[in-house]
Structure formats: structure tokens, C-alpha cells
Image (cartoon, rainbow, N blue to C red):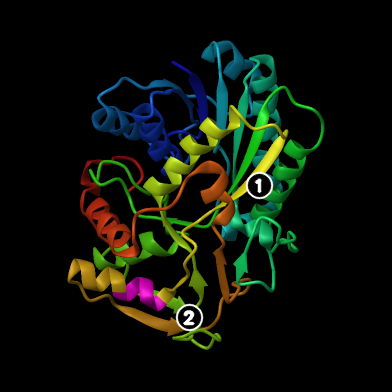
């Protein structure tokens, strides 16, 4: 059974990817410093999968401790990073330090362990202030709008430079939403949510007074921003597909956008949430938010043709799963 190091494996995307790896016959080896998650997630992954999860509470920046703890490796999926766009503007040095040092550390570990594959958690933020609404992997990287996005660009460049022992795949995520259908794992925001859907679910649950929609005067069908919302379970599956593909790829590095190929407006997302869950959400229209671009979604031709992967879950399923997860949160301690 192939052993895959999953850094940040108890986080939102990491936890769902661990489940997908186990289901695909891989053995995830998880490290997480629990800064933005809780140990309860490990137990939930084990409940879903029926398998014990190999876990080490370690900081990804500590290459020596990681290397000494984890044993043999066949591949790496690197999630561990700080990820709040707003916080990155307030604490840029912390973001550059945390996100780049952890990556360099895990590259060192991967080379020491002779790992064959390295899957990097990148982001559509690398396209920055692009003028294209529908981007492909060939779309030029834009001017970064925030330090978080810049750390992803720099991370990609680090992995593209120099000769590594492993094959590298860069996965540029669009907007992950939803939760596992069991409602045992999902997004666990620490404090005020940075992402839209947790803010929606917390507003519906009465934890937040009101949701603010930032701007309704964009050149879109209803005036609100358009994004490519992908179910986190589909996104997790893309990592398994990337691992499988890495075993036969000839190039040293390849890059894939991971989205649905469809854009939805913020108001469409809210209306879908209300409809599938039979709820009415309190929201107001606010001013545009600095740094928000009008529309961004991806062309999926490359990932479908080369990885054989395609998003399957529709937006109503994502919104239903998000609400079921929110309602189940009573059993999570320490972050709520």
C-alpha cells in the first residue's frame, strides 16, 4: 500500500482528501500542527473510513522532526499553509514565512524519502487581476492581489525550479464548498469565517446576525461576482487522480485548474442555499470589496482529458451538505 504524506491533513480539504485516499487504497500519513483545526477531525476520518489514521502532531516547517517520524514515503500532498486572504494583508511576513518555509521543508523531506510524487495545493488566486473570466492553465499569472496569493505563485515557482527526485503536479483550486455527505467533516472556520459559505451557514444558524453581499453593480446577470464553486469531495478526488497520473507522466511538472467549469453568482449561491434547505437568509447588499474581481471560473478541458477527472456534484448538493455539516457542529470542541 502506497504511503502518502498529507501535510495539513486535518484541515478542510486535507481531511476530505484523506478519506478519498483511503477509499482509493492509499495509506495517508498525516501531519498537522492543529493551528486551524482540531484532533476531533482525525476521529471523524476514522469513523467515515473505518480505518485507523496514521497521524503526527508536527509543524511542516520542522523537516527534521517530520523526516524522523514518518518512515517510508511514496508521495506527498502538501496542504499545510495559512490561507486567509484578509489576514495575509494584515500579517504578510507571517504568511511568507509560514507558507514558504513549510514548502521548502517538505520538499527536503520528499527528496530525503525518495518520494515519487509531489502534489501542491495551489489556488486560482495565482491568476491575480486577470482580465479573463474563464481561465485556462495557459492564462498568464496575474499581479497578486494579496500576500496569500503571492505565496502560491512563489510556491509554484519553487517547485518548477531546480531538479527534484519527484514528479510535481500543481493543482489550482477554485472555490471549495460543501462537506462530506456524512456531515462528520467539513469546513471549520476559526473565528469569523473568511469564506462565503460558512458565513452563509452561520447566519442561517443564528451565529451571525446578517450576511453582507459585497457589491451588486458588477457586469453580471444579477450584479454580483461570479465564482466557480466546487464541492470539496470532488476536489479531494482530483488529488487521487493527480497521484495516479503522476506515476506515468513524463514531464517534471504539470499544472491543472480544478473547478467545475461553470460560474455562479453570489446571489445564485444564496438562492440555491435557501431553496434546497427551505430557509430564508438575512442578507444585505454592501459596497464592493477591495481586491474582488468580477468573474473567475475555469476551463476544465485539460484536467478532464489528462487526469480523467470531472466534478460530479452540483451546487444544490453542495449547499445541502454545507447546511447538514453546520447543524452537526455541536460535537466539535475547541474551535466553535
Residue marked by disc 2: 224
Residue marked by disc 1: 95
Q: Which residues are magenta?
A: 267-271
Q: Residue 64's spot in the image, x, y percent?
A: 65, 16
Label 2, secondary structure: give it: loop
Q: Considering only vertical position in the picture, is 6 above or below 229?
A: above
Residue 299 inside the magenta-drawn segment: no
Sequence order check: which comes first, mark 2 or mark 1?
Answer: 1
**Of residues 118 and 101, which is closer to you in this image?**
118
Q: Considering only vertical position in the picture, is 265 above or below 18?
A: below
Q: Residue 187's spot in the image, x, y percent?
A: 38, 49
Can see residue 90? no
The residue shown at (48%, 70%) is: 263
**Picture quarter containing residue 245?**
top right
**Of residues 44 and 171, which is closer to you in this image?**
171
Label 1, secondary structure: give it: helix
Can see residue 260? yes
The residue shown at (29%, 77%) is: 282
Most extreme residue toward the right, as rendered?
162
Give the CA distance from mark 2 to mark 1: 29 Å
**Of residues 202 and 117, which is closer to you in this image?**
117
**Picture quarter containing residue 38?**
top left
Q: Is residue 75 left or right of residue 230?
A: right
The residue shown at (61%, 27%) is: 117
Q: Residue 223's spot in the image, x, y percent?
A: 48, 86
The residue shown at (28%, 68%) is: 273
Most extreme residue toward the left, as rendered?
278
- The reply to whether the C-beta atoms of the residues labelled 2 and 1 are less than 8 Å apart is no
Q: Residue 316's spot in the image, x, y percent?
A: 29, 64
Q: Quadrant of the N terminus?
A: top left
Amino acid at each position: 500500500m502506497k504511503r502518502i504524506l498529507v501535510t495539513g491533513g486535518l484541515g478542510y480539504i486535507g481531511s476530505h482528501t484523506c478519506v478519498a485516499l483511503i477509499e482509493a487504497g492509499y495509506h495517508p500519513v498525516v501531519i498537522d500542527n492543529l493551528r486551524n483545526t482540531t484532533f476531533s477531525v482525525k476521529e471523524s476520518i476514522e469513523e467515515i473510513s473505518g480505518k485507523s489514521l496514521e497521524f503526527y502532531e508536527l509543524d511542516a516547517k520542522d523537516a527534521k522532526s517530520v523526516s524522523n517520524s514518518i518512515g517510508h514515503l511514496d508521495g506527498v500532498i502538501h496542504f499545510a499553509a495559512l490561507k486567509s486572504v484578509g489576514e495575509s494583508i494584515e500579517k504578510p511576513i507571517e504568511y511568507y514565512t509560514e507558507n514558504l518555509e513549510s514548502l521548502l521543508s517538505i520538499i527536503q523531506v520528499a527528496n530525503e524519502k525518495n518520494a515519487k510524487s509531489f502534489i501542491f495545493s495551489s489556488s486560482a488566486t495565482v491568476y491575480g487581476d486577470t482580465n479573463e473570466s474563464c481561465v485556462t492553465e495557459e492564462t498568464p499569472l496575474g499581479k497578486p492581489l494579496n500576500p496569500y496569493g503571492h505565496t502560491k505563485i512563489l510556491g509554484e515557482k519553487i517547485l518548477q525550479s531546480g531538479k527534484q527526485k519527484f514528479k510535481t503536479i500543481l493543482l489550482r483550486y477554485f472555490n471549495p464548498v460543501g462537506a462530506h455527505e456524512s456531515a462528520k467533516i467539513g469546513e471549520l472556520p476559526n473565528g469569523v469565517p473568511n469564506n462565503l459559505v460558512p458565513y452563509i451557514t452561520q447566519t442561517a444558524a443564528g451565529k451571525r446576525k446578517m450576511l453582507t453581499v459585497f457589491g451588486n453593480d458588477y457586469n453580471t446577470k444579477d450584479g454580483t461576482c461570479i465564482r466557480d464553486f466546487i464541492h470539496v469531495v470532488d476536489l479531494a478526488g482530483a488529488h487521487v487522480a493527480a497521484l495516479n497520473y503522476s506515476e506515468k507522466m513524463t514531464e517534471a511538472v504539470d499544472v491543472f485548474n480544478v473547478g467545475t467549469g461553470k460560474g455562479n453568482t453570489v446571489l445564485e449561491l444564496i438562492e440555491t442555499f435557501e431553496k434546497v434547505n427551505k430557509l430564508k437568509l438575512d442578507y444585505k447588499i454592501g459596497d464592493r470589496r477591495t481586491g474582488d474581481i468580477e468573474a473567475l471560473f475555469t476551463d476544465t478541458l485539460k484536467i478532464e482529458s489528462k487526469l480523467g477527472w470531472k466534478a460530479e456534484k452540483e451546487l444544490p448538493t453542495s449547499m445541502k451538505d454545507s447546511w447538514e455539516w453546520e447543524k452537526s457542529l455541536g460535537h466539535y470542541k475547541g474551535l466553535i
